Amino acid sequence: MAALTNPHLAAGSDLHAVLAHPRFGDRDPLEVASALQSPMDDGWSARVLTALGLPALAADVHEGRAEVPDAVRVAPTSLGRSLVNTYLRYYDAPAEEVERRTAYGKLYDRIQRNPVATGVALSAETVVAVALLAAAVRPGRSPLARTTLLSGGVVGLLDAAAGVVLATRRFRGRRVVA
């Protein structure tokens, strides 16, 4: 009955196409359709976008009452630059972000803020990576085992090298008192 009185609920409607997207799949079609059917006024866009689960800022930007803050602006970057930025954001996270992490994430942050613990962790990672590479070149390994060991060793060495660079940047000029 609702589909007969509300064209947004009819099969093949644009609303169904939007709700088919994974980002909006958990939204209630009746709630979104009722927001679309409401009379047009100053809050109409906000009601529709809120029904889709978007923040109120999205409606303000859509209706020209606000601009996207500079910190949220998106600019195209290379894959390498994106990876470096993501790595740095995680590594340099403020305390309130670290509090939202899992136990492993909190432990990682504590280790990375202590020069001695960082040195021990990076040394252990390097030893494991070298052991993986040494195991990969031993005769008698299957191609799959060789590829897996080589991949693990290379990734481990790259991560250890990145860790050394980040630790050098963080601890430069600090004196370690043991």
Image (cartoon, rainbow, N blue to C red):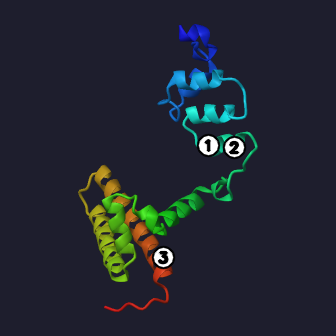
Kindly identify the amino acid type of the residue bearing the numbered disc 3.
Answer: Val
Q: Which mark is residue 56?
A: 1
Q: Residue at x 68, y 34 (%)?
A: 43
Kindly identify the amino acid type of the residue bearing the numbered disc 2.
Answer: Asp
**Disc 1 to disc 2: CB gap under 8 Å:** yes
Residue under numbered circle 3:
165
Label 2, secondary structure: give it.
helix
Label 1, secondary structure: give it.
helix
Q: CA distance from mark 3 to mark 1?
A: 40 Å
Q: Residue at x 64, y 56 (%)?
A: 77
Q: Nearer the viewer, mark 3 or mark 1?
A: 1
Q: Which mark is residue 60?
A: 2
Question: Which comes before the other along the chain, label 3 or label 1?
Answer: 1
Category of crowding for the residue at label 2, using alpha-carbon neighbours closer than 10 angstroms: few (below 14), some (14–19), many (at least 20): some
Kindly identify the amino acid type of the residue bearing the numbered disc 1.
Answer: Ala
Counting from the top left corner in percent of width and height, residue 109 is at: 38, 69
